[in-house]
Amino acid sequence: MPMAYALRHRTALAVIALLDVALAAVAAALPWPAKLAVDSALRGEDLPGWAAWLTRVPGLGTPAGMLALLAAASVVLVAARSVLAGVQRVMRRTAGQRMSADLAMDVLDRLQRGSLARRSARPTGDLVQRVLADTRCVDTLALGVLLAVFQAATALTVMAVIMWGLDPLLTVVSLAVGPALLLAARGFAGSMTRNATREADALGDVMTSAERMLSAVPEIQSFTAEERELRRFAACADRQVAAGLRVHRTALLYQLTLGGITAAGTAVVLALAALATLRATLSVGDLIIFTAYVAALYSPLESTAHLGDAVARARAGTRRVVEVLESTQDVPQRHHPVTLPPAGHGSALVFDGVVFGYQPGRPVLHDISLHVEAGETVALVGPTGAGKSTLLSLVPRFFDPWAGHVFHDGVDVRLARLHQLRSRVSVVRQQPLLLPV
């Protein structure tokens, strides 16, 4: 589901992918000026067939002229790589923030329009975590994972084709590291996902604890409970730190495993390439190409394998976001709602045998019947927890009764248009709430 938000920015994603292709081409071309400088300008060997025409250009027939041209080419390639990478970085940041903002808006809209019964089942801090942090999963999945895999595959393909033209055997040995990296990624995937989910849940608990403390400062001070609440927050923070450390320990072990695999592969390839150079089956310039390409080849392979940590965090965030987006609407609306009669000097309310509770099998309201005429003032009096606010919450359909009916001007509120019904009800809370203008 979150990937649908990425597809809204498909044009930007396509441009970023094209920039990946351009960067792969530039990266493949970067070692060639050094190869040509060593083999042709310094050792006097003939230029490759595709570059032989350069010797016919005035001023390039001498080693000095050729070195100057190759140095200029290196500068141009480095500058092109910097410009392309900078443009791509800006586009990635912009697209990622926009798609995350789109998802966050829908999650927030779902929460504010959803049932209060489902909303109150989750702490506020945890919901804030889902809106502000977990919604970044779409950015991570689209740009940090899928486009990163495309970038690595593009660079890998370009360099593997060029390396195959130089020495097929060394190319096969170089690519043999890939399956080992993928096996390592698969082996660590499960534990990293579990640890990332626990860390996200623990961070939600920390935010919930902080939100509760800050919203109840007067009460905390009145009961001199500062130390107790601080210890409670510290316990949540300690659990979050422990969860984060588990994530980082697993990630560190994963990175060490990948580093060991790539280091072993690099050593084997370079040793074979050096032996081929000593046997004169590979030129010194080709050795330079292979040395650069092995490092460049393992970089996308290793970066792809390193995505395991990002995938784990994104999967954890996706699960928490989808829980909100796929939550059922506890206050359903009819496809053809009834229009309430025109408002006069008040509205008549009727509660007929109402039964309701917040937990199954534990009703708060037991067979409540009440008739309030238009313009009549009624005060509901009772101890805390008796159900006064709960009864009034049934009028604008914050909740629906388990049994019985609530009538507004003779219309069952479950049949009325929800927006029209709530626009007829004015609510004054015990705690004042000021919304920004």
Image: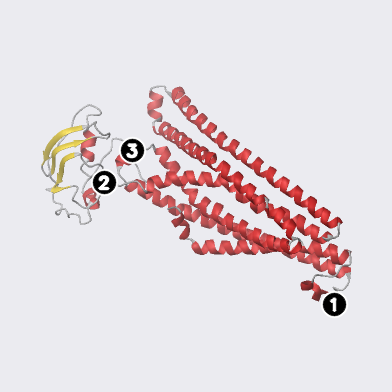
Task: Find residue 331 and name its label.
Answer: 2
The kind of residue tagged 2 is: Val
Q: Name the residue under label 3.
A: 120
Q: Residue 348's quadrant in the figure?
A: top left
Q: Is residue 4 left or right of residue 350?
A: right
Asked if residue 409 can be seen in this view, the reply is no
Say whether residue 349 is visible: yes
Q: In the rendered structure, which disc, 2 or 1, sits on the residue that comes first in sequence?
A: 1
Q: Identity of the amino acid at label 1?
A: Pro
Residue 229: give x, y in percent of width and height.
44, 26
Q: In x, y percent, where is residue 257? A: 65, 41
- Answer with left or right where residue 123 lies relative to residue 19: left
Q: Which of marks 1 and 3 is nearer the N terminus?
A: 1
Helix, strand or loop at label 1? It is: loop
Q: What residue type is labelled 3?
A: Ser
Name which residue lies at 79% across and 73% down.
49
Residue at 70 percent across and 56 percent down: it is: 172
**Residue at (48, 39) in percent of width and height:** 197
